[in-house]
Amino acid sequence: MKKVAVTGSFDDLRSKHVRFLEEASKWGGVHIFLWSDETVRALEGKTAKFPEQERCYLCQAVRYVSEVRLVKAQVERDVLLEVEAIRPDIWVVDGADDTPQKRAHAQSRGVEYRVLKDEDLKGFPVPPFRPTANHSGRKRVIVTGCYDWFHSGHVRFFEEVSGLGDLYVVVGHDANVRLLKGEGHPVFSQDERRYLVHSVRYVKHALISSGHGWLDSEPEISIIKPEIYAVNEDGDKPEKRAFCAARGIQYVVLKRVPKQGLPRRQSTDLRGS
């Protein structure tokens, strides 16, 4: 497999970043040369919204990424540092970051240069869900939620829950999120939210709910047939407990504990209301 290099801060990781990584992965294994906090300040003249350790954790969690390398003390935007470490075959850049200097630098290093434009990154593709027999020997685990302003706390939750079995995530559909949280919610569409959730390597598959209320995922649960329903403390509801008890589904409540060394995150704080 060819080695693909991408560079940048990947600050406030959103669907556009993940779409870029997904398309880049079609040319080979993606190696992110992630700008450190120091490098972000030098190249962008501002402090990164999220610290390097958190950005690294999020990038490593993306299923389309093979490796993340932290690049420190870089003072030029148009060079690819540490290429000898992995000897990349291809350098992929976003159309907005394409420069003649980058092209010349890639040529001088004998690295193929490719550009992904906005039209290459449209849509939120997720493979269709097709129920199959469970051949993995692992239990099926389901989690549900809005996952509107995606952050490291969501990824940590998925990471922990995936230790219980194959993880299926049901993302609340737009109308139900508005019903439960009020106008102004969600910020991002159900298709975009589902796409981001599915991009996490700990997730087996992500679906969009089709029911209503706190148990909007009931139709999807009947299809997935999970042995475990996991929630965090905020998502613990009497309706969910009763639902699982009536169907013989193990109900697991996890504490909201961030990944070691990372700050505690909540979507409400990040979206500003």
Image (cartoon, grey):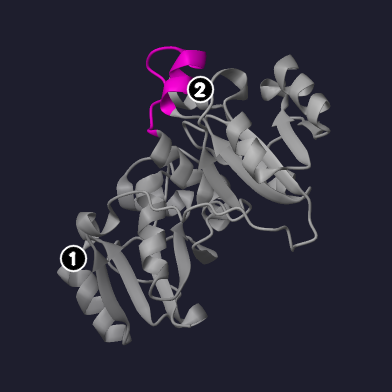
How far across and how far down the image is residue 227, in percent?
A: 78, 42
How far across and how far down the image is residue 37, in percent?
A: 47, 48
**Residue holding disc 1:** 99
Q: Is residue 178 left or right of residue 133?
A: left
Q: Residues within 10 Å of mark 1 (few under 14, many from 20)?
A: few
What residue sits 73% from the left and 42% below the top?
226
**Residue holding disc 2:** 269
How far across and how far down the image is residue 234, in percent?
A: 67, 21
Amino acid at circle 2: Asp
What residue sits 42% from the left and 26% below the top?
174
| For residue 192, above or below residue 270 | below
Q: Is label 1 in contact with label 2 (beta carbons under 8 Å)?
A: no
Depth order, front residue of 173/19 = 173
Q: Which residues are magenta?
A: 174-189
Question: Which callout, 1 or 2, points at the residue further toward the start of the chain?
Answer: 1
What residue sits 27% from the left and 76% below the top?
113
Depth order, front residue of 116/11 = 116
The quadrant the C terminus occupies is top left
| For residue 39, above or below residue 7 | above
What residue sits 72% from the left and 44% below the top?
141
Amino acid at circle 1: Thr
How far across and how far down the image is residue 46, in percent?
A: 35, 40
Q: Is residue 22 left or right of residue 136?
A: left
